[in-house]
Amino acid sequence: MEKIRTAIGLMSGTSMDGIDVALLRTDGRAVVERGPSLGVAYEPAFRDRLKLALEQAKIITRREQRPGELASIERELTLRHAIAVREFLAANALDASAIDVIGFHGQTVLHRPDEALTVQIGDGALLARETGIPVAYDLRANDMVHGGQGAPLVPVYHAALAVNVADATLPVCFVNIGGISNLTYIGADGVIVGYDSGPGNTLIDQWVETHAGVPFDQGGMIASEGRVIQDLADRYLNSPVFTVEKRRSLDRNDFPAPSGADAELADGARTLAYVAAASIIKSSGHLPVRPTLYVICGGGRLNRVLMQDLKDLAQSQGAKVIAAEEAGFNGDSMEAEAWAYLAVRSLDGLPLTFPGTTGVRAPVSGGVVVKP
Ligand SMILES: Nc1ncnc2c1ncn2[C@@H]1O[C@H](COP(=O)(O)OP(=O)(O)OP(=O)(O)O)[C@@H](O)[C@H]1O
Ligand SMILES: CC(=O)N[C@H]1[C@@H]2OC[C@@H](O2)[C@@H](O)[C@@H]1O[C@H](C)C(=O)O
């Protein structure tokens, strides 16, 4: 029997809303025991620092470069992760010595898969020193070295969940609606296909922040007062992203925010919720078989308008949509759990990515492991 390790996963996603922390006991293979989780929100001032980091990262041509304030933002980000770990351990009466490894995603500040360039800021050695726990980080880079897109990485974890917990329902499609959305298809024959499916919450967040001064459309309340502007929706849904033969990973900047002239507040939020839902269904046309069950995780599942659109569109194809919780999972912590799982696989040199997920030439492992 393989060694079972206790791992913490840390995710700071493209929405830049905060740090998700989750505990997992796993052998990095079939054994997956999900533990507690915690969300630690960033205050608006730090989100502004991250937005500055995204701007300043645009001139990076080599991944180790840290122009402008990137080095100091990287340090602040890392120290915030260390605090989040300490809070998590205290809240669950755990000692650092009980944790074998931390899987540290960091913050993506630049992702240009066509140039084989992806940059996640986050200092793994500093996090290891601050927490006293070994850290596995920079999990995307080796995939790119071997011809992959560097994302998405969660499919191997979705597959472990599907096979272990939901095997009665294969084939299944997991969809993560974060800043960008990504999906994983697990076929009845065990085949795994994954790619980024389109815009998720980022466009909605940008829209309501600019026009209503709020960071996101809670529950889809704003959208629920509006109507879909089809021309605006089509502008996104006609993007070549949906028709290219080889599906790729996406960057926040791939879908520019609409301008104030395009819509008024509620119609804009309504249209962008529809775009997020329709992008998923449109993207699922690239899968080997149209899924009959979608399991939804990520913050977008809490936008009721988006979820209803998704249910309606899926139903018209005879498919069912359920939130992660209805399948017994935690839709808020799934990505953080995935980073814990990937960290354990990294320790054991097991593949993180596959030709069917990132387009990598052959399955490869990855990550840098640092001891405290
Ligand atoms: N109660 C809610 N109602 C509506 N939307 C919500 C709610 N809570 C969170 N969200 C949306 O979910 C987003 C955060 O989602 P999540 O944490 O899954 O993204 P992420 O992990 O940052 O992104 P990614 O998966 O792209 O890396 C928020 O920015 C917001 O748009
Ligand atoms: C480069 C990068 O950070 N990509 C993220 C982003 O956010 C969602 C989507 O785009 C996905 O491809 C990926 O994150 C998830 C966790 C992944 O790698 O599986």
Image (cartoon, rainbow, N blue to C red):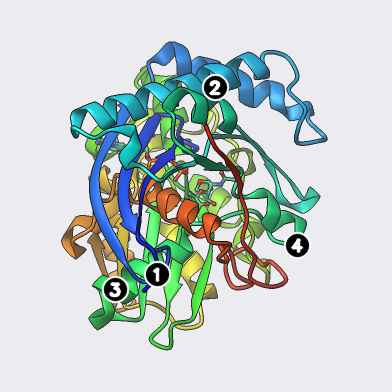
**Residue indicated by mark 4:** 147
Instruction: Residue at 47% x, 65% y: name it.
Output: 156
Label 2: which secondary element: helix
How far apart are the two marked residues, 2 and 1, measured between alpha carbons?
39 Å
Q: Of the residues tagged 2 and 3, which is closer to the observer?
A: 3
In the figure, 255 relative to 89: above or below?
below
Question: To which residue does mark 3 refer?
Answer: 164
Q: Is residue 308 visible?
A: no
- Mark 2 — residue? 50
Name the amino acid type tagged 2.
Answer: Leu
Image coords of residue 23 (percent x, y): 30, 46
Q: Kindly identify the residue that appears in the image at 55 percent across and 29 percent down.
A: 259
Q: Earlier in the sequence, mark 2 or mark 1?
A: 1
Q: Which of marks 1 and 3 is nearer the N terminus?
A: 1
Q: Is mark 3 on a helix, strand or loop?
A: helix
Check disc 3: other Cα within 10 Å, few if <14, some if 14-19, many if 20+: few
Quadrant assignment for the N terminus: bottom left
Q: In which quarter of the image is residue 81?
A: top left
Q: Is residue 360 above or below residue 23?
A: below
Q: Give residue 2's mark.
A: 1
Residues at marks 2 and 3, CA–CA distance in whole angstroms: 37 Å
Q: Provide residue 356's location: percent of width, then percent of height.
A: 59, 73
Number of residues whose C-alpha sits closer than 10 Å to that of mark 4, classed few (under 14), some (14–19) or many (20 or more) = some
* Location of residue 150 with respect to 71 vertically, above or below: below
Q: Of residues 45 and 353, which is closer to you in this image?
A: 353
Q: In the rendered view, would you say 143 is above or below 363? A: above
| Ligand 2 neighbours mark 3 (CB distance < 8 Å) | no
